Image: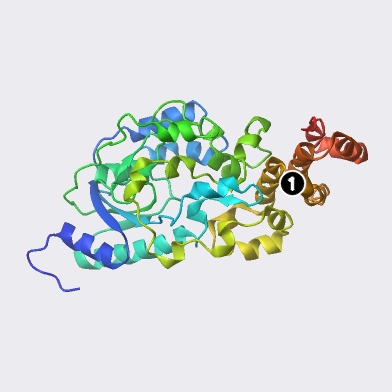
Amino acid sequence: MTISISETPEDLIRRQALALGFDDCRLARADQPWIAGARLAEFVAEGRHGEMAWLETTLERRSHPQAMWEGARSAVMLGVNYGPDHDPRDILAHPDRGAISVYAQGSDYHDLIKKRLKQLASWMAQTFGSEVKVFVDTAPLLEKPLAQASGLGWQGKHTNLVSRQFGSWLFIGSVLTSLELEPDPPGEDACGSCRACQDVCPTAAFPAPYQLDARRCISYLTIELSGPIPAEFRPALGNRIYGCDDCLAVCPWNKFAQDAREQQLQAREVLKAPRLEDLAALDDAAFRALFTKSAVKRLGRDRFVRNVLYAIGNSGDAGSVHVVRARLGDEAPVVRGAAVWALSQLAAPDVFAAERALALPAEMDEGVGAEWGQTPA
């Protein structure tokens, strides 16, 4: 890259970031006071993090960027657009198909973005002699508040980042650096009086604007929760088997959204609208093969098939009973329990009663017994 003597370090960093394939690059101070740490502490104290114990164990390190790295002075915030070419909610009208969150339909974004972050960080270290550290989602760094501080967007009423240029569809990565960089203006909240994201939520996961109770969120329930999903939320899942895009997709700022230009982030055809019956039959090897290079793979086969069976139970298709029955003897208790619930939703009362009579007494000791207490729909 040819460097002009009139270009500032900030100009050079932005230009290099865009050349590496990032769609946006903004700068923020990493050594300024902020309230994000206190808000996270309140979230955890209220128990809204559910089973995500790592939020509690890393709370102190998440309290401020310098709690992660004392030498951090600035943050280079990067955005990669993953905008879909359709409304992700369209799949909800097809109950025999599984709805997988947009971000997980392509290749795992962690791998793509981390590679580019390392390239940018290496270039910064060589060019400016600065210390650098890279982060993409998996480290205890509050990236969304930093993204808002940099002007990459603002945290909307659904607590996710909203971009004026890309709407709801922006992956975030960051490079913390010892460089003293001039920050960009922070993102200004442009939600106004709109409450579309709150109103559309199937499980009422937003107790107030800008607040989330993860324990009610379908993304949490289908991805983070390890055991059975509470019965009160199962009908609201519909055919959502991995995550939920409703609050993102409904945002009016998506009128400015763009289709993802990165080929690896575009949806794989096989994951756009997979048949639930096919997914319910997956064993571990088939699951791993189908979701190779996908974020879904980290979920594991058992939790995924659990979700699929809940979706089949919600389909109203009595013709799927044979698919459900095949999972009643699954090795994983969480799968068997989901199969029992699905059977209770689809089978005639006499059929369900007959299956219940065949259940072994030992089954009642593995947490599946409560599912047999369901009243058939």
Please identify the residue farthest to the bottom as the structure is shown.
2
Please give the name of the residue rendered at 31% of the width and 50% of the height, measured from the top-left corner.
256
The amino acid sitting under disc 1 is Val
Please give the name of the residue rendered at 64% of the width and 66% of the height, measured from the top-left corner.
289
Specify whether 181 is left or right of 251. left
Residue in the foreground of this view, choosing between 373 and 33 = 373
Is residue 125 something one can see in this rendering?
Answer: no
Q: State the scheme by which the image is colored.
A: rainbow
Q: Quadrant of the N terminus?
A: bottom left
Q: Which residue is mark 1?
A: 335
Vertically, is 3 above or below 366? below
Please give the name of the residue rendered at 36% of the width and 41% of the height, measured from the top-left corner.
252
Percent of width and height locating residue 254? 36, 47
Is residue 51 something one can see in this rendering?
Answer: yes
Residue in the foreground of this view, choosing between 160 and 73 = 160
Percent of width and height locating residue 189? 28, 36
Percent of width and height locating residue 96? 66, 50
Please give the name of the residue rendered at 24% of the width and 65% of the height, measured from the top-left corner.
16
Q: Quadrant of the C terminus?
A: top right
| Element on which disc 1 rests | helix
Specify whether 173 is left or right of 284. left
Percent of width and height locating residue 101? 52, 50
Crowding near pointer 1: few (<14 within 10 Å), some, many (20+)?
A: many
